[in-house]
Amino acid sequence: MTLSIRNQIPGTVSSVTTGEAMATVKARLTGGQEITAAITVDAVKELGLVEGTAVRAVVKSTEVALATGPVAGLSIRNQLPGTVTDIAAGPAMATVKVSIAGGELTAAITRDAVTELGLAAGSSVVALIKSTEVALATV
């Protein structure tokens, strides 16, 4: 299957915690970071997710926020440090490519945010992704 979603990062399931209807699945990405996905228990069963399953974490670029450093006191589970490699800005929106250990993320943010954060190629950032916005695909 081919997707228009740019962010597809390979990893391996490190844990699965199931609840009544929802589950949290943690995956160790190829760069060593951990990402958490909140998905349905049905999806866990249908995908056969267990510790050791090879997966791709899939995230739309519009669901990636950027900060200029780690953020404390926040419910967002996924904070991936990286470096800005490219910015393509239009009149209103921009796409920001961020190199992370083991891959690359693209964030779609406003042009104003790029300016206010002082982002440029080489800037250190932290990509913030809510666990409910991370989908998993088996490899």
Image (cartoon, grey):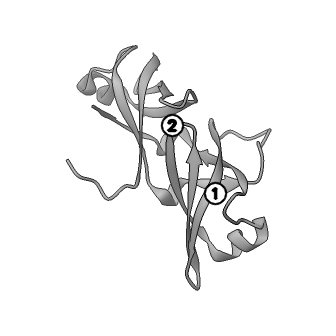
* Mark toward the start of the polypeptide (2 vs 1): 1
Query: Where is 9 relative to 40, above or below?
Result: below
Q: Residue furthest bottom?
A: 91
Rendered location of residue 58, percent (x, y): 40, 44
Q: Residue furthest left?
A: 1
Q: Which residue is mark 1?
A: 84
Cβ atoms at labels 2 and 1 below 8 Å apart: no
Amino acid marked by disc 2: Gly
Of helix, strand and loop, which one carries label 1?
Answer: strand
Question: Which sits in the foreground, 102 or 131?
Answer: 102
Q: Is residue 116 visible?
A: yes
Of helix, strand and loop, which one carries label 2?
Answer: loop
Residue 45 placement: quadrant: top left
Amino acid marked by disc 1: Val
Residue 8 vs residue 91: left or right? left
> What residue is shown at x 28% (from left), y 54% (from top)?
3
Query: Where is 47 relative to 106, above or below?
Result: above
Rendered location of residue 15, percent (x, y): 47, 16
Query: Where is 23 relative to 106, above or below?
Result: above
- For the C terminus, which image quadrant? top left
Q: Which residue is mark 2?
A: 102
Rendered location of residue 125, percent (x, y): 70, 51
Q: Residues within 10 Å of mark 2 (few under 14, many from 20)?
A: few
Residue 104 vs residue 111: left or right? left
Q: Residue furthest top?
A: 51
Alpha carbon of mark 2 to alpha carbon of mark 1: how far? 14 Å
Query: Where is 128 relative to 139, above or below?
Result: below
Q: Which mark is residue 56?
A: none
> What residue is shown at x 59% (from left), y 58% (from top)?
85
